[in-house]
Image (tube, rainbow, N blue to C red):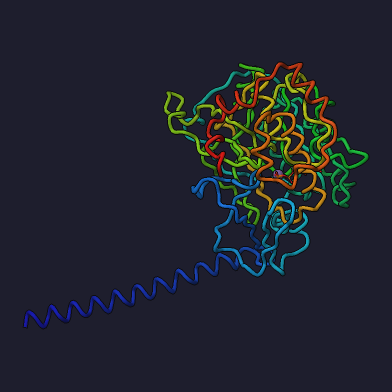
Amino acid sequence: MRGATSQCVLLGSLACGLWLALLLAYLLRNLGTEQLAGEDPGTVWLLGDRRPAPHPAAWLPAPQERFGRPREEEELDEERLEMSPGNKRILYVPSDLNDEALTFGFNVTKSRVLGDEREVSDTRNEMCRKKRYPYHLPMASVVICFHNEELHALLRTVSSVIARTPAHLLEEIILVDDYSDLNDLKEELGHRLEKFWREVKFIRNKRREGLIRSRMIGASSASGDVLVFLDSHCEVNQVWLEPLLDAIAKDPQMVVCPLIDVIDSVTLQLRPSPLVRGAFNWHLQFQWDHVFSYEIEGPEGPTTLIRSPAMAGGIFAINRRYFSDIGQYDRGMDLWGGENVELSLRVWMCGGRLYVVPCSRVGHIAKQPVQYKQALLQAMDRNTVRLVHVWLDGHKEQFFRRRPDLKSIAYGNVTERFELRRQLGCRSFQWYLDTVYPELESLMLS
Ligand code: UDP
Ligand code: MN
């Protein structure tokens, strides 16, 4: 009898368990589709890059793009992969992707709904929130260059700076319109900026200059002690500027980057990034890299400034005079790309320092670069070749072995940049490898 009862109980519980498991599976499946359905299917689109990520950690925010986050391989739909010839970037282009999203690189519908201003969650570490900075710090000129940026993303960038920067530290915001042709960015933008007339200076380029020269145009009309460069689709977080200014006040040859949080290109939600440093591979492509745990074991813990071999490029702060002293940017570089690695090498090799400041957080829309035009790809390649010739010394071959197609392309005249290197008395690339970024040598055979 006892045996029969326990058999009944056992069978009953097994049946119950089975039903529960089935119910759970059904619920999970539905939840998944509901979430997707809520994400505006017209603009749900993904990008991937099939080059293996240099580090397996999925949390690294941007191995391939300057900021974008790679998707898992299996999320890609093979039929929709396209190869762009220049840099083998593989793009995922759903057929129902709307044209606007293709133009801007993110979910435009969502951006319009969010509007010109919003609150964002404080992504800083607890220890950062307890930190105090001197009241008197150098003043900042924030330079934001844009070319055909989505209006609301641009306005959120400006309004986030105004809302979250103490007025006594903000000399000005300099907007440089790099010859945009979108209607929204003409009169409409002018009207929307009227309320910020005290803070915002507006420059419109008379021809397309590209990001690199536009930044120099912005910098030349700045009067703050420190230049802070931002992309035109950012949202700065609480107390973002003080830690950057504080580091530069202590050492004017210090170039500093905030920790860049990811604003998802589809949902536009802010995703906090882990502590990372900037680096690059032998293709001279920027990538995020792990921070060694011993670097944050000191008393400052996760608030410690992190030595960084390279910067992502879009967002950083630099003493204005120092920016001029070390030769700004290479004027011979076009449009966009390569300038971040060039400046990083120049800073390190010519006596400066480059650090990530983890208590300064800036959100950046990790755009999907689905519409890289041929001209942009060519500019990136040409810019990179310029920097290879000026800065890589005997290690040039490491680059050309991987990009034999670039060995004989025309890259213009680099005499002035060589002369700058001589005048500044810069160290060798071997010194940089030995002292700043020894991990690159281990990638020598890859
Ligand atoms: N930009 C510009 N002129 C150009 C190309 C880009 O002013 O010819 C601006 C662009 O609007 C953005 C910034 O430069 O504010 C960086 O470009 P993007 O965000 O496309 O680069 P990513 O963040 O993908 O590295
Ligand atoms: Mn950007």
For residue 339, side relative to residue 31 (left or right)? right
Please determine whether, in this image, residue 211 is positioned above or below residue 228: below
Q: Position of residue 441 (x, y in %)?
A: 55, 34
What residue sits 6% from the left and 83% below the top? 1
Can residue 292 be seen?
yes
For residue 67, side relative to residue 423 (left or right)? left
For residue 155, side relative to residue 266 (left or right)? right
Which quarter of the figure has residue 231? top right
Please determine whether, in this image, residue 275 is positioned above or below residue 256: below
Q: Position of residue 319 (x, y in %)?
A: 71, 21
If the image is split into quadrants, where does the C terminus sit? top right
What residue sits 62% from the left and 67% below the top? 78
What residue sits 89% from the left and 50% below the top? 181
Q: Position of residue 444 (x, y in %)?
A: 57, 39
Q: Quick one: 59 or 408, which is closer to the camera?
A: 408
Q: Quick one: 243 or 164, which is closer to the camera?
A: 243
Q: Residue furthest left?
A: 1
